[in-house]
């Protein structure tokens, strides 16, 4: 890694740390209690350039490599200590890429800049009540009538689903079942016939998550992304960035658990000595650090490989996709281990609302499921490596 990139990474991570420590961490418990966070946070993140990181300059963004973005994602999780904030504040990072890559220039300029300025919220809607990880089985339909598509169906577990102004929706435009008939359609949040139901969750309490109901929703045909039948490929390509982001977040949350557990172990006394002086506790902390170090090294390697492949025009190289899948599993397992150990070290305090470890403990499972469940990741990795 050259010196310029190292300096840029350090500066960006420091900016993100200060933002997370001042704007997010002190408010997380109140936002969890309220079930949402203020829309003004989008504007403040945009003013620092965080929402536009990785997007084209002509759309108001700042191009950035995986290697540059990685420490920023980690810092947001480590110092913000809330998966709910990160999930909704950056839901555009899964909702906008298909728009940037496949929409017409006019639609890109209409949709992307206001989102990157924090004025609008973007979301992605793939999962359906009866489909889960089986994207090819989705049943939400979009029928072309004149210059509009008419959308009918349901999507569920949609992050920012209650507040999104633009929703990138996977729909079935072709006949029958399977991947070939899937398309991607950008749906305005104020479209008549679109209804939303808020969902209650175990974690990510300040992130609004919804089921979306499409009842003869008419969407201008110009909001079709790419061509009909190309949606499945878009969905699969979109997963790469999402999964790297999830891995980076899991790494940051693991570090947050270690930070809190280590501070508690140094402060808390038991049997006449600080907890850190007891071998059993020290060994738990070392086990946490060991897993964090391996996750960090793997994330750096995957990010660097992704940058090299993009430079070579090989965006979805099978061996890289396999590494992403395995990294996502490893990172979330690290988070699970560190959250469990941190709660154990904190004892009764670890069971109390208001500690980072308690919150992260509840958020582990959505990280292990979202973006592709562990079992799906293993199967995809095996296939990408040519084992089947």
Image (cartoon, helix red, strand yellow):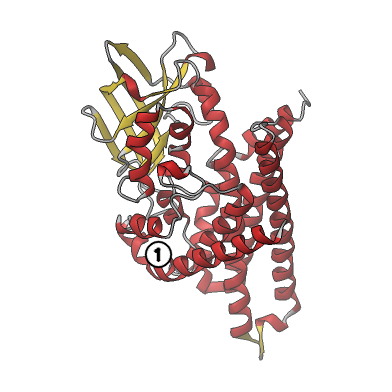
Place residue 106 in its image quadrant: top left
Q: Which quarter shows the N terminus?
A: bottom right
Q: Residue at x 64, y 45 (%)?
A: 328
Front position in the image: 381 or 90: 90
Q: Residue at x 44, y 11 (%)?
A: 174
Q: Which residue is mark 1?
A: 28
- Residue 338 coordinates in the image, percent (x, y): 63, 61
Q: Residue at x 42, y 36 (%)?
A: 124
- Give the left or right position of residue 294, taking residue 144 as reference: right
In the structure shown, which secondary structural element does the residue marked by tag 1 occupy? helix
- Residue 143 coordinates in the image, percent (x, y): 33, 13
Front position in the image: 106 or 183: 106
- Residue 359 coordinates in the image, percent (x, y): 48, 61
Whether residue 38 is visible, yes or no, is no
Place residue 291 in its image quadrant: bottom right
- Give the left or right position of residue 42, taking residue 69 as reference: left
Q: Which quarter shows the C terminus?
A: top right
Furthest residue toward top: 175
Place residue 382 in its image quadrant: top right
Q: Is residue 222 above or below residue 175?
A: below
- Give the left or right position of residue 219, taking residue 20 as reference: left
């Amino acid at each position: 890694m050259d010196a310029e990139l190292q300096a840029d990474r350090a500066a960006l991570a420091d900016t993100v740390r200060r933002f997370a420590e001042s704007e997010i961490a002190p408010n997380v418990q109140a936002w969890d209690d309220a079930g949402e966070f203020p829309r003004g946070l989008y504007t403040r993140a945009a003013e620092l350039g965080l929402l536009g990181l990785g997007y084209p300059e002509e759309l108001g963004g700042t191009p950035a490599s995986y290697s540059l973005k990685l420490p920023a994602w980690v810092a947001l999780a480590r110092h913000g200590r809330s998966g709910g904030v990160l999930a909704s504040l950056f839901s555009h990072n899964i909702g906008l890429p298909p728009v940037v890559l496949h929409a017409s220039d006019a639609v890109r300029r209409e949709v992307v800049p206001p989102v990157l300025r924090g004025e609008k919220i973007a979301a992605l809607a793939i999962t359906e009540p009866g489909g889960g990880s089986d994207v090819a089985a989705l049943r939400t339909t979009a029928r072309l009538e004149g210059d509009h598509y008419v959308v009918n169906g349901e999507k569920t577990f949609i992050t920012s689903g209650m507040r999104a102004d633009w929703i990138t929706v996977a729909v079935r435009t072709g006949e029958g079942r399977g991947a070939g008939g899937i398309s991607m359609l950008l749906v305005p949040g104020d479209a008549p016939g679109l209804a939303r139901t808020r969902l209650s969750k175990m974690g990510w309490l300040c992130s609004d998550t919804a089921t979306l109901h499409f009842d003869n929703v008419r969407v201008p045909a110009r909001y079709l992304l790419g061509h009909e039948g190309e949606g499945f490929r878009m969905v699969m390509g979109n997963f790469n960035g999402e999964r790297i982001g999830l891995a980076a977040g899991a790494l940051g949350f693991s570090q947050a658990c270690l930070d809190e557990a280590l501070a508690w172990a140094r402060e808390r006394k038991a049997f006449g000595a600080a907890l850190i002086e007891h071998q059993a506790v020290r060994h738990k902390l070392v086990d946490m650090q060991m897993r964090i170090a391996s996750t960090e090294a793997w994330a750096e390697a995957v990010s660097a490989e992704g940058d090299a492949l993009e430079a070579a025009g090989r965006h979805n190289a099978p061996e890289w996709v396999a590494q992403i899948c395995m990294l996502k599993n490893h990172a979330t397992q690290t988070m699970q281990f560190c959250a469990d150990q941190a709660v154990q070290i904190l004892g009764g305090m670890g069971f109390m609302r208001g500690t980072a470890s308690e919150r992260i403990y509840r958020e582990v499972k959505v990280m292990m499921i979202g973006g592709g469940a562990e079992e799906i990741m293993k199967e995809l990795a095996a296939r990408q490596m040519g084992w089947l």
